[in-house]
Image (cartoon, rainbow, N blue to C red):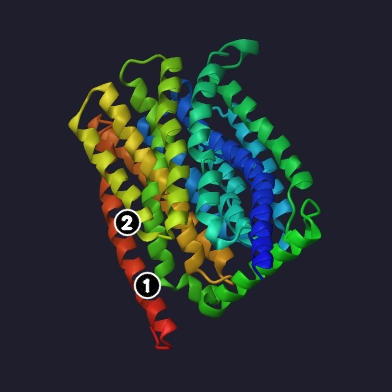
């Protein structure tokens, strides 16, 4: 008996190791390019805004259009992934958004930029929740927060790598008669197209199809994931209509919008904020990468700690409080070094939040509603965090001339999000206790 248990433990360990090394690095690279391509407008703005005549509010509106179309197309895209399979649909998403990114090099004014950013959001919609859904086919829930945190290191890593890279590409200004920001969009968009074609060769839709696992590993993983799906179905399956009428889904979207807003606003506006201290383009690109480097390390550690302790509620709430603290602290100083520290606090919170939150959200949703539920939460949080707050930042900046004051609405949103999380998690815990006791919630 002891040998059997030991063998099963070894089988589990080896299977998870293979799944992690096969899927996560590749998906991380794909997601890294997703965030480079959606966020490179921040570094491009250092040249582009002057060339095509953008005011702060116009630039904020252009940045927000990505999130508006992302919201519109996110749920349909994730449902399409279920129908056509992850391999084909993720490839479609990447090829289309890579082409649209490259086409941004040819915008001539505000209106053409608005159109391209809207199309980019529609093209990329569904990628992140699609990957989350895809991981629920492959990764048992006990490992999910750390895997999601590792995967989502691609977000801060995109700015850590992308900021200096974009600054270098801006130095190509004048080559072959093109501006540096045009080279930036072309050379950062086309590699994504190649990665999209790589998806068709590299990804496997389901564990049962994985020839890179042994037969015993395929059987164990398929059985484990089917058992977890059955568990979630028993306690949480709802129709789509009921899902979209469920206040908990919209509550979770409000919670997620805190981190989404912090990440989206800084991704787009932080280069201009830093350059306002008199830095060169290259200095701006290098310094812009520092907060993301710190966040990349700490978000993985935080996700592993959440898995190790099995605690999700406070592992989600504490990063949100760190976001709020960092945002308010920026009002207290006008010096560069303290501002970089405050920006690091905000981004550490925004990215450390993600692993525990998405592990918690996946558990709260039934397997039958996970695809639409995860997409709805992500799309709505992007609409609030990106579509609204990126605009709000531009309006406040244009009205006050202060980058620090423009961050204040984000702090208010953060406190609302924390309160919502604590209420929802307490209500969910009570419902679980009543369900185990056989009483109605």
Residue name at image x 57 percent, y 37 percent: 32
Q: Is residue 317 rendered to the left or right of residue 369?
A: left
**Few, some or many C-alpha atoms within 10 Å of disc 1 (few <14, some 14-19, many ≥20)?**
few
Q: Position of residue 337 (x, y in %)?
A: 28, 23
- In the rendered image, which residue does mark 2 sit on? 417
| Towards the viewer: 57 or 224 | 224
Q: Is residue 335 rendered to the left or right of residue 17?
A: left
Residue name at image x 54 percent, y 39 percent: 154
State the image quarter where residue 234 is shown. bottom right
Question: Can residue 77 be spotted in the picture?
Answer: no
Q: Position of residue 253 (x, y in %)?
A: 42, 59
Residue extending farthest left: 332
User: Relative to residue 81, is residue 112 depicted above or below?
Assistant: above
| Towards the viewer: 80 or 289 | 289
Residue name at image x 36 percent, y 31 percent: 56
Q: Position of residue 261 (x, y in %)?
A: 38, 46
- In the rendered image, which residue does mark 1 sit on? 429
Residue name at image x 50 percent, y 40 percent: 155
Question: Can residue 275 be spotted in the picture?
Answer: yes
Q: Earlier in the sequence, mark 1 or mark 2?
A: 2
Q: Which element type, helix, strand or loop, lies under badge 1?
A: helix
Separation of marks 1 and 2 at Cα, in angstroms: 18 Å
């Amino acid at each position: 008996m002891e040998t059997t248990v030991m063998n099963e433990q070894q089988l589990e360990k080896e299977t998870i190791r293979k799944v992690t090394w096969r899927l996560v690095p590749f998906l991380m690279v794909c997601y890294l390019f997703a965030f480079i391509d959606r966020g490179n407008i921040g570094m491009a703005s250092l040249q582009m805004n002057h060339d095509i005549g953008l005011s702060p509010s116009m630039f904020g509106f252009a940045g927000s259009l990505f999130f508006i179309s992302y919201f519109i197309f996110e749920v349909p895209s994730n449902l399409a992934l279920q129908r056509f399979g992850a391999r084909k649909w993720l490839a479609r998403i990447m090829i289309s958004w890579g082409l649209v990114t490259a086409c941004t090099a040819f915008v001539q004014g505000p209106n053409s930029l608005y159109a391209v950013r809207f199309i980019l959001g529609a093209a990329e919609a569904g990628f992140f929740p699609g990957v989350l859904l895809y991981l629920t086919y492959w990764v048992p829930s006990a490992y999910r927060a750390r895997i999601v945190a590792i995967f989502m290191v691609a977000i801060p890593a995109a700015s850590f790598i992308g900021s200096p890279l974009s600054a270098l590409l801006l130095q190509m200004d004048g080559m072959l008669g093109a501006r540096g920001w045009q080279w930036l969009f072309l050379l950062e968009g086309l590699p994504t197209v190649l990665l999209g074609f790589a998806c068709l060769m590299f990804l496997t839709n389901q564990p049962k199809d994985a020839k890179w696992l042994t037969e015993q590993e395929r059987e164990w993983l398929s059985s484990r994931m089917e058992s977890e799906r059955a568990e979630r179905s028993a306690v949480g399956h709802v129709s789509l209509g009921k899902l979209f009428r469920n206040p908990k889904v919209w509550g979770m979207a409000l919670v997620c919008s805190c981190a989404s807003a912090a990440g989206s606003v800084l991704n787009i506006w932080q280069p201009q904020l830093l350059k306002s201290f008199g830095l060169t383009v290259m200095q701006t690109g290098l310094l812009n990468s520092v907060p993301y480097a710190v966040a990349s390390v700490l978000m993985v550690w935080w996700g592993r700690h959440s898995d190790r302790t099995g605690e999700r509620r406070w592992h989600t709430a504490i990063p949100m409080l760190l976001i709020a603290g960092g945002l308010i602290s920026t009002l207290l100083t006008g010096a560069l070094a303290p501002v970089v520290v405050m920006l690091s606090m905000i981004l550490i919170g925004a990215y450390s939040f993600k692993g525990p939150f998405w592990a918690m959200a996946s558990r709260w949703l039934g397997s039958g509603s996970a695809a639409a539920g995860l997409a709805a939460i992500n799309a709505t949080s992007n609409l609030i965090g990106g579509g609204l707050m990126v605009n709000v930042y531009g309006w406040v900046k244009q009205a006050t001339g202060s980058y620090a004051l423009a961050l204040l609405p984000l702090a208010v949103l953060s406190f609302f999000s924390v309160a919502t999380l604590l209420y929802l998690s307490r209500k969910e815990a009570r419902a679980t206790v009543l369900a185990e006791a056989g009483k109605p919630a």
